[in-house]
Amino acid sequence: MTMQFNDETFRGDYTYHNSQKAIRRFPFPFDQDAYMYSVNIEQHPGGPEGSPFEVMFDVDEHYVAEMKDREITLAEDPLRCQSLPHMELAGWDLLELIMVSKARDYPELFTLHRDGNDWHWINKPLGIEKKFTFLDPTTLPCGPMEYITRQTQGDFALLHERDGNLWMDAGMVTSQADWSLDFDVGMNFFEWHAPVPKARKMGVFDKALKFLLSVGQDQSYRRLNWTLTVNPRLDTSPETYHKWGPEKRSVTPENVGRKQFLRVELQTFFRLPRSNALAFPIRCYLANLEDLAGQPKWGRRLHRVLRDIDPTLAEYKGFAVNQEMIVDYLSQFDDGAPTSPGIFPDG
Amino acid sequence: MKLALKVTEIEQLSPLVKRFRFEDPKGASLPVFSGGAHITVEMPEGDTIRRNSYSLISDPYDGSGYEIAVRREDRGRGGSLYMHRKLSEGDDITVSTPANLFQLDLRARKHVLIGGGIGITPFLSQLKQLDMEQKPFELHYAARSREEAAGLKLLPKAAHIHVHLSEEGARMDLGAILDGQPMGTHVYTCGPEGLIAAVADQAARLGWPKSTVHSEAFTAPPPGEPFDVVIASTGQTVTVKADQSLLEALEAAKVEINYSCRGGVCGRCRTKVIACEGRILHNDHWLSIEERAAQKDIMPCMSRFKGTRLELDL
């Protein structure tokens, strides 16, 4: 096995850390020195070698620890994983997409043997070996979506298409930026986006829905979204706000560089073949300000973006309370020099 | 993505309908699909490429090949004539990957499928999916005569498959079919517009929620009189021939335009009209009655024009 997996935690003592390699490949979301909403959609997969955009489902040094964290969250709150009865077929579609992709993209980590519907799956990092019958739920310990997403980094929403809209009728959500599957399950695209400020008026959602409905079975896309989180916590859910909300007050000018994390979501879209549903994986990447500022371009740009951001967005993304401290800290990395275009670090 | 396939079987199902099977030349597995999906078939003739969309009739989970059934339209643009007269087993054929604008609503407690004439086609893949999913359904197939009923050769014989041949006095009674269905039943209709309207009307009268009534009406674009359009961005004039759709003419003239279904139902090719001196002949199922009357939008995959000037925002 070529990949080393970190022994780390996303709660309690928060031992989560990024290697130099992980920092260099971090999906920094700002391609310019300012931020406003846009339908920033690109084809996926595809990107520089080693970047998280290179393959369908990126597996990195945090894989094993993230799956352990998901297990803890699910044990405490099983409603983080829900699938309405008509979504089981979409679950199988997703399982196939992930197993086939991972076995192809990481042959040293994952193996899939298929003989008709008799499948044999080997997941080396998690020590799983399973023979099962594709499309027969009695041969898996849980539903197909739950089975595969307990082995795949990132949250997953499965969207059912009907009446010209998309409905969030299934999902696995344990590393979310303050939204709740239990609250949103069964909602349509406009309903679950209702809390997002400004965007509806800007027509962003109408355009985005139109785009998503036209995604074909041979096409897949991605976009990046971001927020800020105090401490490297995957599970920032409304249900556990009492656990992580108060941590925002633990930030000081001395620790802000290490405690304040940029949280980036790599969102991808896939049309699933048998169910015609859309899969919407939301992969979370975390890096603290200190690590990011180690890349001079990112230090300068992050300072400018967070300093000049629309106050409504700072409030919505939940960092308004610490914005001044964050910007003060980042200002030491901004010498006013111009930044190069694009998201990737220099040199 | 386009798939370069080979025609491996052609079968005459009825005097007007042929079945075609396409496979990968190297035997590779094709993408599986969902019941009700269609593919777009390319039919190159001279310097134009005609593209028609046809429902897949084969097993959606079987990637060994795709099958479609094509009715010969002697007064069409020539697409179906190409399929019937020019295509032979062993020929190359380019098709799109499957897309679905007529999917089953798998929330339904029961599915009632009603197909009229060649409108039986999307249900042939749907009933295979329903069988595999073990979902309760009944299918009603209406045709004029036994000779014309191409679907007879493709439908399994089963108690829940009902064939209504009007020439034999067995006209379909929609009231009897829809009345008394269990709560949570969804109905799907594909066929002539009159049939779709009649099912919708009957369902409304029986108090079915609108969201349980589905239909697919897409047909190939009709031919008509030639006409000219002006492309606003370049000032270029494009002539649409009698046997070409506006979309095909735009493609032949290398004007960039989006499309998917090519049957007036998906909305992808919707185009703004900048100037219109004359009447747009709307043949799509996308624009509302008000939008049609306003003549500010056109669906180039289906619609045509009669008049002196039509300028498009392209």
Image (cartoon, rainbow, N blue to C red):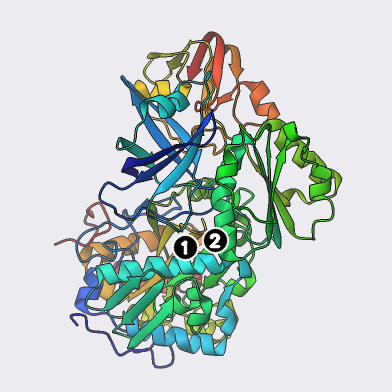
* Residue A310 shown left or right of residue A102 in the figure: right
Quadrant of the snapshot with the N terminus of chain B: top left
Task: Tell me the element at label 2.
Answer: strand
Identify residue type, mark 1. Phe
Where residue A153 sits in the image (x, y, percent)? 38, 75
Residue B202 in view of the camera = yes
Q: Residue at x 39, y 57 (%)?
A: A223
Where residue B72 sits in the image (x, y, percent)? 51, 27
Compare residues B294 and B139 and report the one nearer the observer.
B139
Quadrant of the snapshot with the C terminus of chain B: top left
Residue A199 in view of the camera = no
In the rendered view, tell whether residue B69 sits above or below residue B289.
below
Compare residues A209 and B268 and report the one nearer the observer.
B268
Q: Pointer 2 and pointer 1: residues touching (CB < 8 Å)?
A: yes
Location of residue B267 by image quarter: top right
Compare residues B76 and B155 and report the one nearer the observer.
B155
Count neighbours of disc 1 (C-alpha within 10 A) and say few if under 14, some if 14 to 19, many if 20 or more: many
Q: Which residue is mark 2?
A: A159
Q: Earlier in the sequence, mark 2 or mark 1?
A: 2
Q: In the image as oriented, which residue stretches furthest toward the top?
A: B308
* Residue B167 shown left or right of residue A226 in the figure: right
Q: Which residue is mark 1?
A: A280
Residue A130, numbered label:
none
Identify residue type, mark 2. Leu
Distance in Å between CA atoms under marks 2 and 1: 7 Å
Which chain is indicated by disc 1? A
Q: Residue at x 52, y 59 (%)?
A: A275
In the rendered view, tell whether residue B245 sits above or below residue A301.
above
